Image (cartoon, helix red, strand yellow):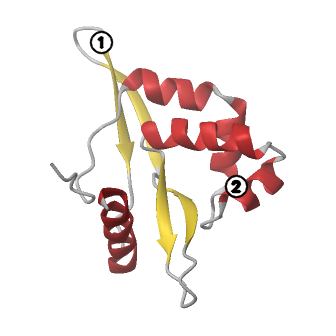
Amino acid sequence: MVRDPFARDEPDLQVVLDALDDPDCRAIIEQLDDALTASELAEHCDIPSSTLYRKLDLLSDASLIDEQTEIRSNGRHRTRYVRNFDTVNITCGDDRSLDVTVERATQSLDEQLSDLWTEVRKET
């Protein structure tokens, strides 16, 4: 089954908390005002590449970043990472359970196309 790249499920509370508790993950989020490559993030955050990819996976699992494929005419496409949320809210319900909601900005058509292209590449 192919995942709908436009459907956003709410991430698991513990996964979000784990990502936000990690100082390297927070440093990555702080740098993502614009889309950056992994090497740019490693340099800006002073994080070794091997560690950076684990942190990117953690942030991706928490649905706090997205991968975008930059299509280049020479065929050597690049992956850039973007922060995909505006606000993370953790609330306590009437039954004392904690819930997480991630508020996101509406995606432009270019962003939707990039997400779709990324999903197609994952499936092939």
Say what secondary structure mark 2 lies in.
helix
Depicted 112 relative to depicted 123: above or below: below
Give the CA separation, mark 2 to mark 1.
Answer: 32 Å
Residue 17: numbered disc? none
Residue in the picture at 71% in, 31% down: 23
Residue in the picture at 65% in, 64% down: 36
Left or right, 71 with respect to 121, comes to right
Residue in the picture at 70% in, 55% down: 31
First in sequence: mark 2 vs mark 1: 2
Residue behind mark 2: 31
Depicted 92 relative to depicted 68: above or below: above
Residue 97: numbered disc? 1
Residue in the picture at 63% in, 62% down: 33
Depicted 80 relative to depicted 62: above or below: below
Percent from the top left, x then y, of residue 34? 62, 67
Disc 2 residue type? Answer: Gln
